Image: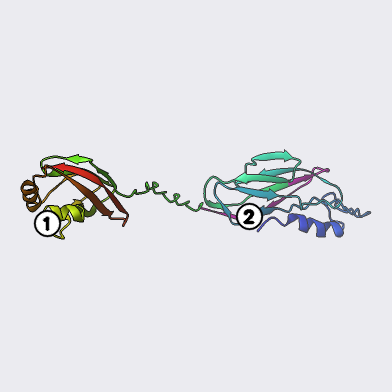
Amino acid sequence: DGDHSGAIWQVFGRRGMGWNAQSPTADSSIEGFKRPPTAVLGVSPSPAIERQPVSIDASGSTDLDGSVVSYDFDFQGDGTPEIAGATNPAQSFTYPNAGTFHPRVTVHDNEGQTDTAARTLQVTVAPTTPPPPSTPAPSLASKAPTIVLARTGTKGRVRFTVRCDSACAGTARLTITRKLAKKLGLGRRRTVGSLRVRLTAAGQKRFTIKLTKKTLRAMRRAGVRRLTTSLTVTVTDAEHQRAAKGRGTRIRR
């Protein structure tokens, strides 16, 4: 694509038929060797993308018997130059929309002669940029279960508190020494109370563990009003985090 008039004039000029040639008379022949400039237009990138700059370059234009002095740039190719009389042969233009355009340059030489070159440019739709992936909110680190045990209890019972960041389960036991078990007539049985611990969801719960009826009867027979026990609680949560705690606890009957 483009205007090839400059090249045609070069051929005419070499044959003495330049733009200033005069018609010969019967008595004389006058040859003209003045040549118009030759316009050359480069476009990059091609094809182009809408809303991104495009280089329109006419620096390859020449004038063999003079010099190129100015450039008119019609970026849209609609016949109305956006830039006229420019001395810089390289320009930049951004096409706001996709479509087919015919950018054109008209070059002027120092003798007032002109030449025009044009290109066909396809401008494509800008690619859609996908939204950035959403970043999940950082999860708080789950803590192991916490257990708080009481020092004393009354009415044959003692309380403790369990807190878990997720569902959890475990056991609680009250035990006494072998010597005390023998004194109460419990034989080798040292466990005097037990309880299953369970939370179905994250939270905190207070539990009560009781002495067995057999232990309470044995305390009455032996005249023991206060029993020294060891309370041990073990809990494991849904993340397999385990907590265990024990302490001595005195329980009144």
Within 10 Å of disc 1 (Cα), the crowding (few <14, some 14-19, many 20+) is some
Q: Position of residue 67 (x, y in %)?
A: 84, 46
Horizontal side of 57 relative to 184 (left or right) equals: right
**Left or right of 16 in this view: 71:** left
**Magenta range:** 107-125
Depth check: give the residue in front, 170 or 238. Answer: 170
Q: Main secondary structure of the magenta part?
A: strand
Q: Residue furthest right?
A: 27
Report whether residue 205 is seen: no
Q: Is residue 248 left or right of residue 22?
A: left
Helix, strand or loop for disc 1: loop
Tell me the distance, in whole angstroms, between the alpha carbons under discs 2 and 1. Answer: 97 Å
- Say which element carries label 2: loop
- Of the residues under marks 2 and 1, which one precedes in the sequence? 2
Closer to viewer: mark 2 or mark 1: 1
Graded by Cα atoms within 10 Å as few (under 14), some (14 to 19) or many (20 or more), the crowding at tag 2 reads some
Nearer to the camera, 71 or 143 = 143
- In the rendered image, residue 116 lying in the magenta stretch gets the answer yes
Examine the rendered structure and indicate whether residue 96 appears above or below residue 187.
above
Coordinates of residue 76 in the picture (x, y in percent): 60, 46
Q: Nearer the viewer, residue 242 or 202?
A: 242
Residue 121 lies left or right of residue 194; in this view the side is right
**Is residue 248 shown to the viewer in this render?**
yes
Which quarter of the picture shows residue 109?
top right
Q: Examine the rendered structure and indicate whether residue 225 appears above or below residue 45.
A: above
Residue at 37% x, 48% y is 141
| Image disc number at residue 216 | none
Q: Tell me, for residue 186, which label it has, or none.
A: 1
What amino acid is at disc 1? Leu
Report which residue position mark 2 lands on: 45
Q: Amino acid at mark 2?
A: Pro
Image coords of residue 220 (percent x, y): 6, 46
